[in-house]
Amino acid sequence: QVQLVESGGGLVQAGVSLRLSCAATGRAFSTYSVGWFRQAPGKEREFVAALNWRSSSTDYADSVKGRFTISRDNAKNTADLQMNSLKPEDTAVYYCAATSRNWGLRNRAEYAYWGQGTQVTVSS
């Protein structure tokens, strides 16, 4: 069982940076892959980034590639999402998720554990 709590959201202007953090409690977090997803009003929850626990490889949605960076600190049981050059279209509730799997990480159905979400609003 893993519990996840996101933090770091807020209201920012376009072009600035924001760092989201996901704090995990529970067993063996280092053996869980971590994903970040987001959901804008009226839209489905979409994949943003993932970090494979076995290979440490990362994957990003095309819309955020080159601007966002996912990382983790297993000693602290945290996973972060550094977001640079934010755009108004990045506005959404951002969710951290964890799975014991290391494949299909773009698919939200593969994730068993979810945080409650943190709001990010980017004004133009």
Image: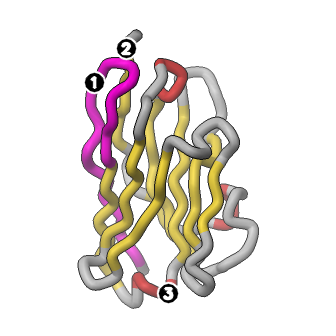
Disc 1 or 2, which lies upstream in sequence? 1
> Label 3, label 1: how many angstroms apart (C-alpha)?
33 Å
Give the numbered dot on residue 11. Answer: 1
- 3 inside magenta stretch: yes
Q: Where does the magenta region start and end? A: 2-19
Query: Are the residues tagged 3 and 2 within 8 Å (C-beta)?
Result: no
In the depicted view, which residue is nearer to us: 49 or 22?
49
Could you tell me residue 34's position as x and y percent? 51, 68
Amino acid identity at mark 2: Ser
Residue at x-position 24% and y-position 78%: 76
Residue at x-position 34% and y-position 81%: 74
Reading the image, the residue beneath label 3 is 31
Q: Is residue 66 left or right of residue 102?
A: left
Residue at x-position 73% and y-position 74%: 103
Reading the image, the residue beneath label 2 is 123
Query: Are the residues tagged 1 and 2 within 8 Å (C-beta)?
Result: yes
Crowd band around label 2 with a 10 angstrom C-alpha radius: few (<14), some (14–19), many (20+): some
Query: Are the residues tagged 3 and 1 within 8 Å (C-beta)?
Result: no
Amino acid identity at mark 1: Leu
In the depicted view, which residue is nearer to us: 114 or 88?
88
